[in-house]
Image: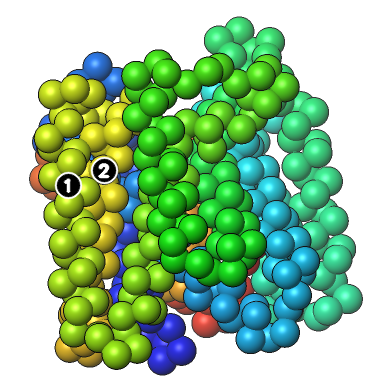
Amino acid sequence: MNRGRIASIDILRALTMVLMIWVNDFWTLTGVPKWLQHASASEDYLGFSDVIFPLFLFIVGLSIPFAIKQRQNKGDSLVSISKHIIIRSLSLLIIGVFMVNYESAHLSLGIGKYWWCVLMALAVVLIWMHWEKSPISKKWHPILQSIGILILIYLSFVYKGGANGDIGMKTHWWGILGLIGWAYLVNALAYVFSKGNLYIMLTLLLVFNALAIFGQMDLLPPLNKNLSFLSVIYGGTIPALTSAGIVATMLYKKLSVNHSKWIFITLIVIGIIFISFGLLTRPIWGISKLQGTPSWLAICSGIGFISFAILYFIADIKKQTNWAKIIAPAGTATLTCYMIPYFVYPLKNIIEIRFPEFLNTGIIGLIGSFVFALLVVFFTGWIEEKGYKLKL
């Protein structure tokens, strides 16, 4: 791992990305054990898949203090950093909206649902590729980005969604990247304007958890219709996970000065407190990702703290990082890694590639899906070495 980075954060991000690609492939399989799957909306249950996305939100928070500090060290002003945060968040929202609309695209779409997805993924690559680090001549950079923008505009015009293909593009639920965008926006701006004050960020974490509780108890007044786009923030659950990550990093930075031996213990204790709260309140709200219950939020926050603590002990205290090199690209080129399946799945349908049923069933299917996740990471690393990497 890069010496200028916190190894445990990169490794945790890489592990989570690999697992996200893996669980996102479960829809292609049959005979997947229940404990690995997402729980349904009516279940009081925490499946393995229900932990992956919240853990990624936690990791977004872990990275924010370091990313902002890096920009401050370069001499970026408060305005410049805030502008970057807003642009980055809007980028995530835009990509998220297109991805969500692909899920509900109608097969009667003129260019075909699957070609629509391929072009969408291509547009994302053209717009958000870190062209400055690529071998492509500088004169082509604005041209390639403009082509990507035109493709997205075209896709939004030809889009047909809904059961009858009579619905245009709409936000729906923002998508995974869109939810990350909202969580990143409010937390990163709060961190910048609070000047990295631990107590303010801790208060924000408690406020978001309180909003999640009040919302579950139907005690929150409804948002004004004109402000409904802020529902993700108002609900508290999604941004709370990122706030927890920020607090974890701030505690790490505070304790690493003179009390590094206490970092592991502190993170573990906080994790246990969150998980205990989630389990104790389970009879009240139940554990449900789809309902976004406070118990699910608390347990996933606790898992985030404990995961960070364990990897900090392994990677940063014991310096054992070689085992994670194989998945390193998933931690350093995460968006690239995430986008690759959006080429693979539609092209597989277009070419009509079909594997024998036994390869998509049970343990054999799970192993195959995990191998697919690793291949995505290996390909990401290969193109990253060639100078191609997405960056918001």
Residue 33 location, quadrant: top left
Residue at 43% from the left image edge and 41% from the top image edge = 208
Gap in angstroms between the C-alphas marked 1 and 2: 6 Å
Viewer-nearest residue: 192 or 386: 192
Residue at the spot of label 2: 298
Indicate the amino acid at tag 1: Ile
Q: x%, y% of residue 218? A: 40, 16
Which label was assigned to residue 275? 1
Vertical placement of residue 312 versus 172, above or below: below
Residue at 34% from the left image edge and 19% from the top image edge = 217
Residue 101 location, quadrant: top right
Q: x%, y% of residue 234? A: 53, 32
Q: Secondary structure at mark 1?
A: helix
Q: x%, y% of residue 123? A: 70, 51
Residue at 16% from the left image edge and 62% from the top image edge = 269
Residue 379 location, quadrant: bottom left
Decide: marks 1, 2 in contact (CB < 8 A)?
yes
Residue at 32% from the left image edge and 58% from the top image edge = 16
Vertical placement of residue 120 versus 30, above or below: below
